[in-house]
Amino acid sequence: MLVLVLLASLPLAWIGREFYRAHYEHWYAESAARYGGSVTHESFEATATAKLTESFPGENWLRYVLDIERKPRLTTVCLVSQESISLVNRLPYVQQLDGVVLCDMTLSDREVHTLLSLPNLKRLILHDVDITPDQLARFIPGKQLTKLQLDGRNATDTNLKVAGQMTQLQEIILRDGSATNAGAAHLRGLADLRSFTALRTEIDYESIPVFAKMSQLSHLQLEPNHPQPEWDMQWSIILAGLPLLPRYMHSDDPILHPPGIHFKLEYP
């Protein structure tokens, strides 16, 4: 008799477990959204997020493996390493997905096609991802992608030339790459660009005149690999003919905010 009771209770226990997971997911998503964050799925160890913390500062990170088909409310998915490449093809199941972070993997045309099929994809962040310029160029016709972040070997002049054709972009972030002022010049045609950040690249203050001509730009942050005196930056600003001098912010945190000058371009 006891055995029959236990067997009969197993389906109820499974239903209760799934209800609890769904309820927890809904609560977590609402809690994160309340504080301006996004629920993030990471496919591998929590330690891997250490290299990604600048991608979504202040957002909530779900640091253990989840079955993303059961998490349709996720808004941001982060996949780390080549071992998680298979999860890219499951992203269409995440119905409200608008941000994808990919790290340390090689994308085939199949994965690129999957990313292009996501109807709400607004943010694409690539950390040391093997993606060809031709593959990246397939995102040019799309209108929904507004943020592009290129880190490591993805932050190149070649990829910036492609990004310069994505006229819908409103935010571009580069980190730890070889991009130069010549690459930044390819962005001059982005009329809707509102924010540009280049951390630890070869893009320096000599590129300021390019960005000064962008009427919608409200945030510009440059922290080049090679140190430049502040007067050099001031002179570049003067040559750019900016309406107002920027406001400076210095940070004492060498890890999240490397030494450099953060400033905003303000227009009347």
Image: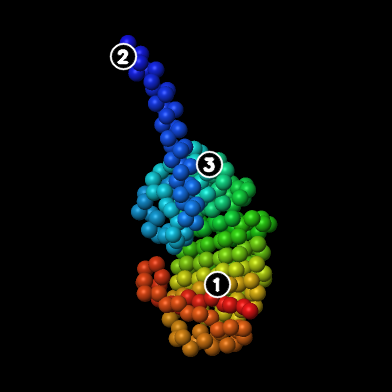
Neighbourhood count class around disc 1 (C-alpha, 10 Å): few under 14, some 14–19, many 20 upward: some
Q: Amino acid at mark 3?
A: Pro
Query: Which residue corresponds to mark 1?
Result: 219
Q: Amino acid at mark 2?
A: Leu
Which type of secondary structure does the marked residue at label 2 adopt? helix
Q: Amino acid at mark 1?
A: His
From mark 2 to mark 1, how far is it between C-alphas? 68 Å
Instruction: Work out whether residue 197 can be spotted.
Output: yes
In the orientation shown, which residue stands out farthest toward the top? 1
Q: Position of residue 165 (x, y in %)?
A: 66, 65
The answer to whether 163 appears left or right of 200 in the picture is right
Q: Position of residue 202 (x, y in %)?
A: 49, 75
Q: Position of residue 244 (x, y in %)?
A: 58, 83
From mark 1 to mark 3, how far is it between C-alphas? 33 Å
Residue at the image point whose x is 47% and y is 60% from the top? 55
Q: Position of residue 148 (x, y in %)?
A: 56, 61
Residue at the image point whose x is 40% and y is 74% from the top? 251
The answer to whether 52 appears left or right of 171 in the picture is left
Q: Is residue 99 above or below residue 265?
A: above
In the orientation shown, which residue stands out farthest toward the left? 2
